[in-house]
Amino acid sequence: MSENNTNTQKPEQNQQTPAQNTLESSQKTSNPVNLSPRDIESHTETIRQGISKKQTNKERSAQINNKLTDDSYKKTMALVQSQLPAAQRRFSQLVHTGFVEKATDILSSSVARPNSIFLGSFFAFITTLGLYFITKMAGYSISGSEIILAFFAGWLIGLIYDYFWILVLGNKDKK
C-alpha cells in the first residue's frame, strides 16, 4: 500500500499546468541569466578584446604582405644588379639606398612633376626661339640665361596647372 502512495505522489509533483509550461519555455528561450553591471562590463570588455584581436590580425596580415613585398623587391634588385657591370652595379646600389629613394619619391611627387617639367621645357624652347629671332633682327645676342629663366617660368606654370587640377578634380586622372 505504501507503494501506491509513492506512485501517486510522483506524477502529481511532475505535472504542471499549461501556463507554467509556457512560462518556463519562454524563460528558456530568452536570456535566463540576469547579469549584474559588473558581469555586463566584463562581457563588454571581452567583446572589445575580440574586436581588437581581429584588428590585430588585419595588421599582422598587412605587415606580412609588406614584408613579402620588401623581400621580393630586394631579391629582384639583387638579381638585376648581379647582371650589371661593376660600375653600373655600384651606381645602382647608390641610387637604390633608402635615403636616396625616399628623397626622389618626395621630389617626384611635389616638385619634379611631369607636367611641370614638360611645360618648362616647351616654354623654354618657344621663348628662346622667339627671343633669338627678335634679338637677331635687332642686332643683339642672347646671353644664355634666357633659357634657364624661360624654363623656370614654364615650370612654375606647369606646377600651377597641376595643383589646380588636383584642387578641382582631386587625385583623379586628367582626361
Image (spheres, helix red, strand yellow):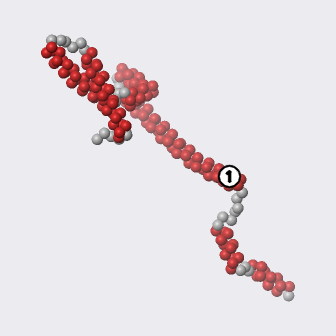
Quadrant housing residue 39: bottom right
Farthest left residue in view: 137
Farthest right residue in view: 2
Answer with left or right where residue 112 lies relative to residue 11.
left
Give percent across and percent down for residue 81: 38, 27
Tag count: 1
**Residue plotted at (64% across, 68% down):** 29
- Mark 1 secondary-structure assignment: helix
Question: Is residue 101 among what the camera can see?
Answer: no
**Residue plotted at (30% across, 28% down):** 157
Quadrant housing residue 100: top left
**Residue plotted at (67% across, 69% down):** 27
Answer with left or right where residue 34 lies relative to residue 57.
right
In the image, residue 42 sits, relative to residue 115, either above or below, namely below
Give percent across and percent down for residue 62: 49, 42
Question: Is 74 or 85 nearer to us in this picture?
Answer: 74
Q: What kind of residue is marked 1?
A: Glu
Give percent across and percent down for residue 141: 19, 12
Question: Is residue 59 among what the camera can see?
Answer: yes
In the image, residue 82 sits, relative to residue 167, either above or below, namely above
Disc 1 packing (10 Å; few <14; some 14–19; many ≥20)? few
Question: Is 1 or 117 nearer to us in this picture?
Answer: 117
Farthest front residue in view: 138
In the image, residue 162 sits, relative to residue 130, either above or below, namely below
Give percent across and percent down for residue 155: 31, 26
Q: Badge 1 is on which residue?
A: 41
Answer with left or right where residue 112 lies relative to residue 130.
right
For the N terminus, give its image quadrant. Answer: bottom right
For the C terminus, give its image quadrant. Answer: top left
**Residue plotted at (40% across, 30% down):** 105
